[in-house]
Each structure stands twice: as C-alpha cells, then as structure tokens.
C-alpha cells in the first residue's frame, strides 16, 4: 500500500502525483452522498446522513448543511471536523467582506478564498490536507444563482448539477438523465429526492437519513431554508407516490 | 479651503472641484485636478491635508483595482464608498490619521453620490459639499435641486453655485473643473 512518496503531503511521486491529496479524495468517496441541482429560480442541496442511531438526537439535526452567509449555503462530504473549521473560516470571510463593503460576498469570491486555504495544505509541508469536498450554493447580484464544487486539492468548478461522496458515479449518471435546464426549484427538489432514493444504500427512505436545503429568490436577493426532518417527510411521500 | 461639490442629476453625477492648489499664502498651481477615476464607473473627489489626500485616494484606487483583478468583478460604487469609509474609520484611531474628505460618485445602473469625511461618516446624498464652500452653496442647492435634473440643468445649477462662490468667497480658487460620471464612465466636462 504505502510507499516512499506518500508520507508527506508536499512531495511529488515519480509519476507526478501527490498521494496524500489523492488519499484525501478517497476519504471523501466513502462519505455519504451529497448533491446539488441548479434550477432557474433557486438551488437545492441534498445529502445522505450516514450515522443514524435510534439514540441519536434528531432534532438538532443538520450536520452536513451549513449556512455560510445570508446568500450562501453549502453541503459537506468528508471529515466533519475538518469541514467545521473551514466553515468557520468561510463565515468569517463572508462577514469580513460584509463589514468592509456593506455588500454580501459574491459566491465565487468566497469559494475561491476557501479553496486557496485548502490549496495551501497541499503545498506547505508538515500538515495533512483537508479531507473535505464542499458543494456551495449561492446567489449574488452580478452572477445570480451559482453552484460550485470544491475538493481537497483546492480546485473548484461550477456546475448545473453535481454530486460527491459514496455512489457519486451513479448519482452523476442519474443527474445527467434527469437534469432539465428550465426546471423550477420545486421540480429540482423532486429530482433531488428521486436521485437520493435511488443512490442511497438503505432500502427505505426516511427523514432521519436525509438532509435537505434550498436557496431561492426573494425580494431582497436570496433566502435559504435548511429543512427540518418534518419538512422533509412530504417530499419523501411525494417521491414514493410517483415511483410506485 | 478647496471646493468639493457633488450634484446627482437624473442620469449622472457632477463633481465640481476648484483648480487652485495653495500652500500657506501662495498659490502653487492653478490647474489642479482633485478627482481620481477609481474604477470604470466610480470617481473620487478629495480634499484635505496635501499628501494625505493623494496617498489615501491612490491607496483606495489600488485596492479597488486589485479586488477587480482578483475576483473578476468590479466593486460597486456603494462598496467602494463603504471600503473608503472603513479605511478612514480605522485610520482615525491610529497614531496619525488621514486628514482627507472625499466624495464618491458613481453610476451602477443609477447614479449615486456619497459624502465621506475624515471621521468616517458616510452618507448617500442627492447633492453634497465639503469645507467652507458648503456654507455658500448648500442654500443654492436646497433651492434649485430637483430629482429630475437633466445634464444641462445640472450644469446650470453647478454654474449657479460657482457664481455664488466667486461672489461671496474671499479667496480666488482659480475656477472649477466639472467631472461627469455617467453610464459611460468618468469624463472631464469642458
């Protein structure tokens, strides 16, 4: 398994690869599936919760959905603790921008800055890279709704629909099939739920195993909504009724 | 003693600034320009301690441009004004604060004008003036300014203000430059 070139993050292998970064991405591919779909009037994010126990407090639910600022939310795949420090950094950056310019941070500006932090750990030695992929969903006045995905190497890309985590290949295939350029947010929510139901390992779809969030147009720009378990139930029922 | 005057009209903002640069009892220059193009659609007019002024506005311009390069989108006029205010407010609590007053004029779809002083006060106004000149022209502006001024009417109002200053102000300010900020950017009006 291991060899001479994967003990430090900052050393290239003879084939020109950075093993620690690749291992970080491998860690992410075991995390619960997360996906995002861009609709014309908003964005939906959905994620699978891996850990679920009868004893786990469900009401303090969201563990993968984070609100970064008034106009940006994200979903996490990977190591949760790594994610939470990055989320804290992102929130500080967003508020710093707001305090200085009296305007919400543009989505790509925030994504780029977070990715610069992540890139740093692939170049400056002694530390491991962040084992986290984010899907960012946000709105700003110049670019409208935007969906981005980042990975531990510090690269980010913009998408119409994307997924990360376990079963990401099958999710991507389904997204390609299901994606309609002109769909509304409501339709996108149904698509997201349908794809989650098909990609998740567990047989029965329950609100304890899902997280859901949307960001949509409002009078003063955008408003986000991180769903409570009871808000997810109707969506599940809807998918069940249509698939039967 | 410098004149710094801004008038928002229906589709543009006018910046009227005096041409004289005086130090002590001497006039050093009679073709001074007190307006700086910050980015394509935003201009800064400035007065205050000589040296501090150029230093400060060039610093603001450099950072605004840097933001544009780094983020592939330019700051809005509102953002430039907020940023300049923040820098002045931070500077105020330092050992040697910038003694600079500015007007931020811009056009992002609609014209807007911000009045910012060295204490870090930022107000959006339809017309604004800094320094002694404000004592002479604000009454004229109160009387004649309306929401629907055309460029020609705005220039006429500027003329009224300059006439008043020439009549009442005890110094020779060597005439005024008028800059126009509209959807096409910043230009010096002949």
Image (cartoon, rainbow, N blue to C red):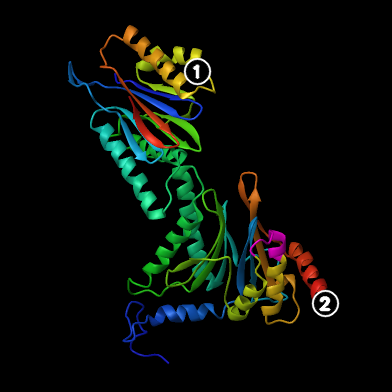
Q: For the view shown, which residue lies furthest in the bottom direction?
A: A1
Rendered location of residue A130, percent (x, y): 45, 72
Is B110 left or right of A220, judged from the image as shown? left
* Residue A243 falls within the magenta-colored stretch: no
Q: Element under label 1?
A: loop
Labels 1 and 2 touching (C-beta < 8 A): no
Mark 1 neighbour density, 10 Å: few (under 14) some (14–19) many (20 or more): some
Q: In the rendered view, does B43 fall on the left or right side of A217? A: left
Residue A24 x %, y %? 46, 78
Q: Mark 2 lies on which chain?
A: A
Secondary element at image label 2: loop
In the visual, does A28 lie left or right of A40?
left
Q: Circle 1 sits on which residue?
A: B145
According to the image, label 2 marks what residue?
A: A244
Disc 1 with disc 2 on a shared chain = no
Could you tell me which chain the residue with mark 1 belongs to?
B
Q: Distance between the residues labelled 1 and 2?
A: 69 Å
Q: Give the quarter of the figure containing the N terminus of chain B.
A: top left
Q: Quadrant of residue B70?
A: bottom left
Residue at x 42% of width, y 47% of height? B74
Q: Which of A21 and A88 is in front in this view?
A: A21
State which region is magenta.
A181-189
In front: B97, or A13? A13
With respect to residue A117, does A218 lie above or below? above
In the picture shown, does residue A109 fall above or below A14?
above
Q: In this view, does B148 lie to the left or right of B89?
A: right
Which residue is painted at 28% across and 17% down in the image? B175
Q: Which of B121 and A35 is in front in this view?
A: A35
The picture places residue A16, in percent across and down from the top left corner, at 34, 82
Q: Can residue A244 be seen in this view?
A: yes
Image quadrant occupied by the C terminus of chain B? top left
Determine the residue located farthest toward the top in the rendered image: B167
């Amino acid at each position: 398994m291991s060899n001479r070139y994967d003990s430090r993050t900052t050393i290239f292998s003879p084939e020109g690869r950075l093993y620690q970064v690749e291992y970080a991405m491998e860690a992410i591919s075991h995390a619960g599936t997360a996906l995002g779909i861009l609709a014309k009037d908003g964005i939906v994010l959905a994620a699978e919760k891996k850990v679920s126990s009868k004893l786990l407090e469900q009401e303090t639910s969201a563990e993968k959905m984070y609100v970064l600022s008034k106009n940006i939310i994200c979903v996490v795949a990977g190591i949760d603790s790594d994610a939470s420090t990055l989320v804290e950094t992102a929130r500080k950056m967003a508020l710093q921008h707001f305090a200085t310019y009296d305007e919400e941070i543009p989505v790509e500006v925030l994504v780029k800055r977070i990715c610069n932090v992540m890139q740093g750990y692939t170049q400056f030695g002694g530390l491991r890279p962040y084992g986290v992929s984010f899907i960012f969903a946000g709105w700003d006045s110049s670019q409208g709704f935007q969906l981005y995905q980042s990975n531990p190497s510090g690269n980010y890309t913009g998408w119409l629909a994307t997924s990360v985590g376990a079963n990401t290949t099958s999710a991507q295939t389904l997204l390609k099939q299901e994606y309609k350029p002109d769909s509304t947010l409501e339709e996108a929510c149904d698509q997201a739920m349908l794809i989650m139901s098909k990609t998740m390992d567990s047989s029965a779809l329950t609100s304890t195993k899902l997280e859901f969030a949307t960001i949509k147009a409002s009078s003063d720009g955008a408003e986000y909504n991180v769903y409570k378990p009871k808000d997810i139930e109707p969506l599940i029922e809807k998918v069940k009724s249509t698939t039967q | 003693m410098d004149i710094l005057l801004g008038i928002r009209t229906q589709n543009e903002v006018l910046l009227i600034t005096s041409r004289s640069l005086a130090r002590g009892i001497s006039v050093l220059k009679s073709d001074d320009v007190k307006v700086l193009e910050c980015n394509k659609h935003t201009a800064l007019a400035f007065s205050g301690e000589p040296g501090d002024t150029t230093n400060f506005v060039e610093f603001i311009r450099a950072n605004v441009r840097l933001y544009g390069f780094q983020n592939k989108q330019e700051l809005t006029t509102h953002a430039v004004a907020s940023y300049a205010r923040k820098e002045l407010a931070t500077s105020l609590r330092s050992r040697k604060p910038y003694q600079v007053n500015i007007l931020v004029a811009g056009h992002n779809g609609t014209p807007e004008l911000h009045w910012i002083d060295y204490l870090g006060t930022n107000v959006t106004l339809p017309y604004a003036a800094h320094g002694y000149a404000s004592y002479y022209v604000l009454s004229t502006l109160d009387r004649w300014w309306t929401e629907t001024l055309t460029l020609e009417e705005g220039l006429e109002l500027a003329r009224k203000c300059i006439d008043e200053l020439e009549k009442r102000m005890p110094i020779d300010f060597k005439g005024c430059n008028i800059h126009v900020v509209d959807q096409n950017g910043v230009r010096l009006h002949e």
